[in-house]
Image: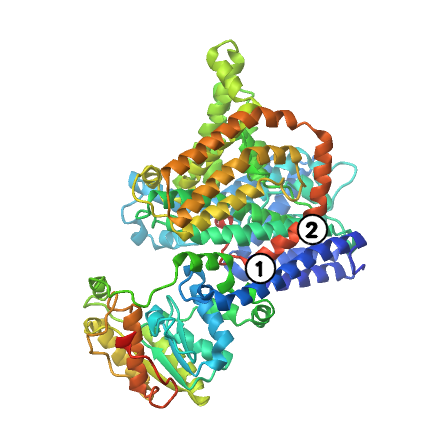
Amino acid sequence: MHLFISNSSHRYFAKVFGVFLLLSWATSAILMRMIPSHPWMIKDKQYMLFWKDSVIERYIREYRSKPIVITGSSICQEIPPEGLRPTNVATIYLFGSGGQMGLELMDRIGAAPKIVLVEATMLLQGVDQDLLDEELRPWTLWWHRIFPAFSKEMRPTNLYCKWAYGIPQLDTPRPATKADILSWVARYPDCAEPDPTKMEQALAKTRHAADHLRSRGSRVIFFTPLSPELMKRPYFIKLFATLRAGLQDYEWLPTNTDKSYYWTDGIHFYSKSGYRFFVHLMKTIGADSSGVVPNLPDPDNI
Amino acid sequence: MLFTSFRFAVAFPLILIIYYLLPRRNWQVVFLVIVGMLMYGIENWQFFLLLSFSAVFTGVTSYLASQPERPTRRGWLVTGVVTSLIILIFFKYKGLIFSSLAPLNFLPKDWTSAHQVCAAILLLPLPVGISFYTFHAISLLVDAHRRPGILGFDRMARVSFPEHFLKTFLYITFFPQLVAGPIVKGASFYPQISPKKWRDIPWIPAARALIWGYFLKMVIADNLQELTAPLDGKWHSSPADACWAMMLGYSAQIFADFAGYSLIALGLAKLLGYELPQNFNMPYISASFSDFWRRWHMSLSLWLREYLYYPLGGNRKGRLRTYFNLMIVMFLGGLWHGPAWRFAIWGLWHGAALACEKMLKDFAERHPDLLFSKLIEAVRTPLFKPLRVLFVFSFITVGWLFFRLESTAQVWEFLGKLLDHGPSGCSAVHTLTYIFFFMVILFHFLKDPALGINLRELYFLGYSATPLLLGMMIQGFQYLTMSRSKTLSLIVWLVILLYYALASPLGLGLRGNDDARHKFEAYIGRIEPYLLGVLLFLIFFSPGKQNAFIYFQF
């Protein structure tokens, strides 16, 4: 068998792969060099298609320098908002998934943060296993290390959207109305109940990953930032009763009763309220006084 | 197994190496059959037996139908074709038939609950690729009966049954074309079944087809898939600008998806030593509807022409019958795409266009002296080609709405929305849609990559499409900066019109320069590897989310 292709083909493919390698290297170098002076390139708000992937990739890249991790669904996006996120805090907010996926990600990459705050509201959302497998494939990890331009965050479509969406403002005023809290309330009518099978599976998987993290020395804490109105719904009463019972040997932060946190829709925060809630979280777990996240700016002075 | 999946990227090089390392060359066919069955079976294990049955049955019936001395050969042909069609109809159209019969009271009202077997049958999923392998089977049966010689059967050299059986198994299960074509005729595939050698691999044409194919699929179609996702019933709240973007985006997406898949199939087959037929040839620059169907899904068009249109009488039985035949062939062709009436309507949309086109042509030929005929002839001159291209493209793009939206009523509603004069709502996402749409148009600047570059078309496109693209880009920029100025738009489009008015005759005069053409061709040949390098880079730099090929559902 002739293992090699003809000489003319050699030259042809040398040109093809030469251009490919040159462009890959040059683009990676240019993009990485641009990031410090163009922070919009790595801002949170981006093309919805790659948002979850980018959050995962970013954590894989930076997990060694993040002793505090907040993980959960889209609810966590603004806890704290970017721009006010201390450098040693990572927020793994996964649209359409929940804290379970964040825990599994940390477990699979062998992360051992000091404190892991798990937003438990959407624990039943499950894990996007295909996405995790894709992101944690050795080939993908290696490829992204060699050519950072090939990470999903750096895709032209994503960069274009980041650029077009503009830089988010921290001083965005509180929405005039409590947007759509009623629509969220309507999603959980009195008769709605969490699916017992899903709940059982979520508990088992969450416990599995949380146990691993705890064995590595992490302090795993569960919380929910839901508004008091939503917490009164029978669905959530039952959900949290079951979750607390199933994970009773873990720390649970008290349910929020302070109505001064402003929500966009009773479930998601807007920037400033997210920061207020973050400071509240840090105070509750004693992270600010212990020096893990010292000198947090006063929420009322930002 | 998806050709764009990581699993396939790992598996295919291994398959290729084992294929060429096999100690006995005649094991290659058996190996390919096993690989094809495994690839199909891994993700469609429920229908593994169905595919096996289809291959075995086609192998037996086509052999019996090909024996000239057998008096029952016609019977075997009919048995084979009817059985294949019954399988296709049962698995693909059961839901459509039941749901269409239910309102006519042919069935008891509670037939789903009363007849649980019926309900269970209805819930059977559609076997992936059934439309394609059934058409392969029918094509083989008919060819084996009509012209056994082209499959290797004749009185002088008899093919043994085991040999034919194995070849048929490969023909049906050849994995590059198993689930979404191109539809290969047995007459062109069987002669290729022979021992293959590594040194005979056409590396450059294979790489060309693969890189273009993956580029079209992963960079264009997969990105557009997300951008046009609101067409799944979430477009009602979108403003007119967004609807325009989605409509054009889908037109580009379906082309990039299917043409990309076909090119990947072609490239993979080349690496295995087989040549599959071209499936696309710059369809969106067609200047007529018949031209479009000679360029779009060419293997299906050929199949429909040969095994449906001609047997129905083609154009040999009078004008009215010809128009009827065109309509019926396109109606069935539309229905072949999916078990829903909207696909049939899409077929009729094209059938009506073809019939009208033929009618106008016939009219002009029969009454050459009438003013209307002269007008028709004038429109058919090269001067009006850009306008004809634009008209055909617009008609086809609107036709895709029947294909994509859930009902005909939604299509009319969507078309109404396009003319809505509401506030602009074009966002970054829609601008991206336009960018990918432009990329598809740019792709049409080049001749189908597996065939090389056709400068005549290139010149035509260069002269006709560049100002159009420029105009659209300026519009896109306006959207981007949100500074929509009606005066600026008007000026841009007036300049474009003026360009066409002045440049058309000039361009037509210059087009015949052979010397310049050869020089340009040589230049393109030199830069091609660099262009492929850029495309390869884009495949890694800018892919969308991995999606199944649209045509897998058919």
Which of the marked residues, 1 or 2, is nearer the chain's N terminus?
2
Vertical relation: B34 (above or below) A76: above
| Circle 2 residue | B529
Where does residue B253 sit, x and y in percent of width and height?
49, 47
User: Number of callouts in the render?
Assistant: 2
Q: Quadrant of residue B478?
A: top left
Q: Which residue is drawn at 50% across and 55% down?
A: B548
**Residue type highlighted by circle 2:** Pro
Q: Is residue B93 visible?
A: no
As rendered, which of B260 and B500 lies closer to the eye? B500
For the residues tagged 1 and 2, is the chain the same?
Answer: yes
B395 lies left or right of B191: left
Contact check, label 1 and label 2, Cβ < 8 Å: no
| Circle 1 residue | B540
- Quick one: quadrant of the C terminus of chain A? bottom left
**Residue type highlighted by circle 1:** Phe
Where does residue B156 sit, x and y in percent of width and height?
79, 37
> Which chain does tag 2 point to?
B
As rendered, which of A97 and B517 lies closer to the eye? B517
